[in-house]
Image: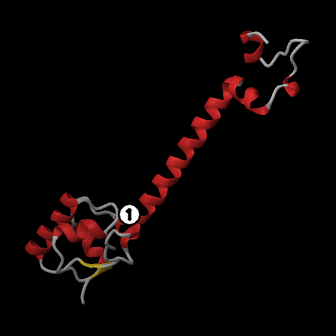
Amino acid sequence: MTPLASIFSVSSASSTPSAQPARTRRRHNPLYGLRTLFTGLMLVLLAGFATAARAVDDLPTLPITVNVNTADARTIANVLQGVGVSRAAAIVAYREQNGSFKVLDDLSNVKGVGNRTLELNATRILLND
């Protein structure tokens, strides 16, 4: 069989693929190496995913709620969705200037905290212990 014929799986009349041993057919098949490489890569990826899943299980859990009248800016930013460190610092600054928040809607007086932020975090925000 010529090299060009083996690449395109065209067999000559004198040599048919079924007449060749399986080992020879594998060795001359250009896709055999790719299949082996693909299988190896998949095994490596699966092992990596298993390791990453174990690493995620080892992470500390964050609290689900936060008291915005007593918490620092970093804690507020870690617990509330859509609230970063700068917006959390604005919440703390507003609290220090105007006193504690009495109702949830008082948070909307803080610049950058709107109704959508309050809706997302209504179950996470505590106003008293």
Instruction: Tell which residue pokes out farthest to the right in this image.
Output: 13
Q: Is residue 99 above or below residue 37?
A: below
Is residue 106 shown left or right of residue 37?
left
**Under tag 1, what secondary structure?**
helix
- Amino acid found under the numbered disc labelled 1: Ala
* Residue at the (40%, 69%) spot, across then down: 57
Q: Nearer the viewer, residue 102 or 25?
A: 25
Image coords of residue 117 (percent x, y): 35, 64
For the image, the number of numbered tags is 1
Q: Nearer the viewer, residue 53 or 26?
A: 26
What colour-coding does the image apply? Answer: secondary structure
* Residue at the (35%, 64%) spot, across then down: 81
The answer to which quarter of the image holds residue 58 is bottom left
Image coords of residue 31 (percent x, y): 67, 27
Instruction: Tell which residue pokes out farthest to the bottom in this image.
Output: 129
Q: Is residue 42 above or below residue 115?
A: above
Image coords of residue 108 (percent x, y): 27, 68
Q: Quadrant where the N terminus lies?
A: top right
Instruction: Tell which residue pokes out farthest to the left in this image.
Output: 97
Q: Residues within 10 Å of mark 1 (few under 14, many from 20)?
A: few
Image coords of residue 33 (percent x, y): 62, 30
Residue pointed to by mark 1: 55
Is residue 47 shown left or right of residue 77?
right
Q: Nearer the viewer, residue 33 or 55?
A: 33
* Residue at the (53%, 42%) spot, across then down: 41
Q: Quadrant where the C terminus lies?
A: bottom left
Q: Is residue 39 above or below residue 79?
A: above
Is residue 30 shown left or right of residue 125?
right
Is residue 65 shown left or right of residue 41?
left
* Residue at the (55%, 48%) spot, across then down: 43
